[in-house]
Amino acid sequence: MLYPPHDAGPVPFRDHPGEEFLFVHEGRAELLLPSGSIELGPGDSAYFRATLPHKVRSLSTERAALLLLVCDDRTGPDTPHPHLP
């Protein structure tokens, strides 16, 4: 689960190999891209290539609760993901 901050200004855009799926479980969130943004509410989802720079912020009073799935499309079981332990 991801609970994005309300202020995403100081957070840099992230990009990484693979694909990403976001599902809003509770609250409202905004998916920020260099070219614009997409507002998401409960039940909304977004699926995109993770090489697209992106970041997310909460819009609701409480932090939004998002289910985040990342699929790394690089081949090889021993290839580490740059943002995961």
Image (cartoon, helix red, strand yellow):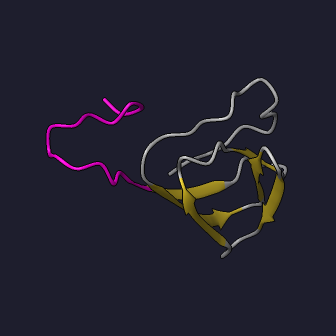
Q: Is residue 84 left or right of residue 80?
A: right
Q: Is residue 46 above or below residue 73?
A: below
Tally of marks: 0
28 and 9: which one is in front? 9
Locate the C terminus by quadrant: top left
* Residue sitting at the far bottom: 43
Residue at 62 percent of width and 55 percent of height = 65
Q: Is residue 22 visible?
A: no
Q: Is residue 21 left or right of residue 55?
A: left
Q: Position of residue 19 (x, y in %)?
A: 46, 57
Q: Is residue 25 above or below residue 60?
A: below
Residue at 80 percent of width and 39 percent of height = 6
* Residue sitting at the far left: 77
Q: Position of residue 10 (x, y in %)?
A: 77, 23
- Examine the image and state in which quarter residue 73 appears: bottom left
Q: Is residue 50 left or right of residue 82?
A: right
Q: Is residue 8 covered in magenta?
A: no
29 and 17: which one is in front? 17
Q: Position of residue 5 (x, y in %)?
A: 72, 37
Q: Is residue 77 covered in magenta?
A: yes
Magenta-drawn segment: 70-85
- Examine the image and state in which quarter residue 77 appears: top left
